[in-house]
Image (cartoon, rainbow, N blue to C red):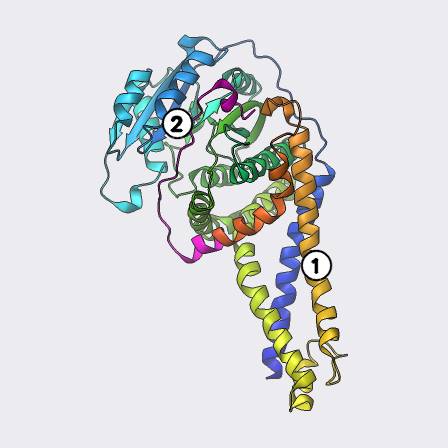
Amino acid sequence: MEILYKVLEAINWVAIVLASLGIVWQLLFTFFGWIKPKKFKKAKTKRRFAIIFPAHNESAVIEDSIKDLLENQNYPKDLYDIFVCADNCDDNTFELASKAGATVIERFEKDPKKKKAAYPIRALMQYVLENYPDKYDAFIKFDADNRACPDFLDAMNNALEEGVEIARAFEASTNATQNTWTSVSATYYIRDSRIASNFRERVHMNSMLSGAGMMVSTKVIKDIGGWDAMSGSDDAEFAINRMLQNYKCHYVPDAVVYEDQPSSLKDTWNRLSRMGHSLHGVFWKKGWKLLFKTFQWKKGGFTYFDMFYTIFFIPIALMATLWFPAYYIFYFIINALNAWGPNANFLASCTNLFNESMTSSWSSNQILSNLLPMIAVVLGSLCFFYTIQTLMAVSLSKKELGIKNLKGYWKGILLSSPFMLVYDLSIVWGVLTNPGWKSIKRNVPTTKEDKISN
């Protein structure tokens, strides 16, 4: 019995340390959140872009997204083309994308394991390289519901001229102020862009890639033999693959992409649980390789540790949701029995291993006063940092968001911390189950103002 208590206590202390490191990370991001975004110099040469859209039953949004890119970019129209893969569609995505001006290919796959966005991405890149082997300098990947700021391609072109080969965009939303769910989801991605990604770029660390508006040079795709990240979290896996090969993943703040956010708890849960399931697989397959590269300090080992800890959030979410409640419920019950039970002296000898000052005379108030402050400190710290970061991120991103004040964003700011509980629980559900792909309602922008969330 004594050995069991010692083992459980040791495991719990390890869990506390691992979870606490996450708080340190948030403190670091918060302290340096004010750093101005990097400005890439104006390019002297205009490069060619192949813009790709993997699309599965996206008839609600694909036509408008293509037209928006073709009509509203401040970039020479003859220097970029749009390619769409109508992937396993049973609607008119193919016809609408063709009508809008894209080159469209179809893909049909019976194997459910290959019904992921990674496969049409790979198919599109192969198609472009086979049919236009030397025409384009870089690929840019958009989701079917995405809009881009008018200077998006120009910003990515500026980064290319400075040697950037892989980059993520600033993620904003087309419907940030629609309701509470879109607001909290939108502010999550704004915080990730303006606080975390901006800090990493300014201190020359790697950024975690996001599929919306992600750019990768044609040279990189040719060098690696085509798209090689085939999990459900293809963007994160691609970033890890490239980091392990010593490529640099950048953040281009002036390249703003607006994406549709889920507008209900159900859609939010489905998207996050699917992401959690796939990221969990990526972590256990490749995450540890990042940790091993951490020890290469002369080659920027800290950036590998940062990225390792970024995806280590999935196991931490599991631990926080499953281990901590189970451990402290067990802890509380044993102490309560020790205080009130008929065998208080026997139980005291066991529970003494948790706390040498523990005796059978403990009252329920003493038990609660020992446990609740510990919980309050951890949760309070996380709530404080997430809220401050979100407020800071939105306040510093008014230009990118197309807003003059924070009206419509306060719900997302104030609920950013409680939202992390939904984030945590949905990810754990995704890890413990295999949720698969579920259709998410598209919120189609109807006006110019809708498109920039204002």
Which residue is identified by label 1? 376
Kindly tell me whether residue 72 is visible in this rendering: yes
Report the residue at 65% width, 61% height from top.
16
The answer to whether 360 appears left or right of 334 in the picture is: right
Q: Name, please, the residue furthest toward the right.
A: 357
Q: Amino acid at mark 2?
A: Lys
The answer to whether 35 appears left or right of 58 in the picture is: right
What distance separates the C-alpha of mark 1 from that of mark 2? 52 Å
Vertical position of residue 186 compared to residue 161: above or below:
below
Which residue is identified by label 2? 222
Q: Would you identify the image quadrant in which residue 404 lies?
A: top right
Q: Would you identify the image quadrant in which residue 40 lies?
A: top right
Which stretch is magenta?
A: 427-454
Q: Amino acid at mark 1?
A: Ala
Mark 2 Cα-neighbour bin, 10 Å: few <14, some 14–19, many ≥20: some
SS assignment for the magenta stretch, majority: loop
